[in-house]
Amino acid sequence: MVMRYYGNKEGLFAAAVTIDLRLPDPASLSREEVGRALVTHFFTMWEENDVLTALLRVGATNQDGAERMQGVFREQVLPLAHRFCPDPEQVPARAALVSSQLLGMALTRYVLRFPPAVAMHTEEAVAWLAPTIQRYLTAPYPQ
């Protein structure tokens, strides 16, 4: 039945799992600290929740998983970016840039387990990523 309705176990997983990133309320975040707050939150989520690692694996190899991740992006990440982006027309691109950084680190640290990414202390990773996320969300459009 799994094969008939979901194609494989990964498809079943993607259909069954509900992902709530429990993102902070955008109104509770200051514009000056949103990058650090968001990166810190994501590291906490990744380190406490193996479901996110599983969904990342499935999303990279399975259409249902990719669609599930796209839904999380649409419903949870875009609204946060909308709160801080200086130009509403740039919200989707900026949210995609934020996602690329966070998912890239998650892929190298929790899925592929690149030794330098795994060995990096969380505080150090936050210090590297937070300014980039901050810039993606709040900086003027690059000329």
Image (cartoon, rainbow, N blue to C red):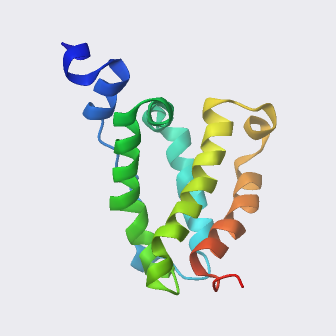
135 relative position to 85: left or right: right
Residue at 43%, 70% in the rendered image: 80
> 97 or 134: nearer the eye?
97
Q: Residue at x 56, y 73 (%)?
A: 34
Residue 25 visible in the picture: no
The residue depicted at 69 percent of the width and 57 percent of the height is: 126
What percent of the width, then of the height, locates residue 26? 42, 74
Q: Return the x and y of residue 55 as percentages of the image width and height.
A: 44, 35
Counting labels gives: 0
Q: Residue furthest right?
A: 116
| Foreground pick, 63 / 55 | 63
The quadrant holding residue 10 is top left
Q: Is residue 40 left or right of residue 2?
A: right
Query: Viewed as shown, does residue 42 lie left or right of 1?
Result: right
The percent position of residue 66, horizontal first and vertical second, equals 41, 40
Q: In this rendering, is residue 61 above or below 126?
A: above
Residue 88 screen position, x and y as percent: 44, 83
Q: Residue at x 34, y 43 (%)?
A: 68
Quadrant containing the N terminus in the rendered view: top left
Asked where in the image residue 3 lies, by quadrant, the reply is: top left
Depicted 88 relative to depicted 131: above or below: below
Residue 64 visible within the image = yes
Quadrant of the rendering where the C terminus is positioned = bottom right
Decide: is 56 above or below 42: above
On the image, which quarter does residue 139 sit in? Answer: bottom right
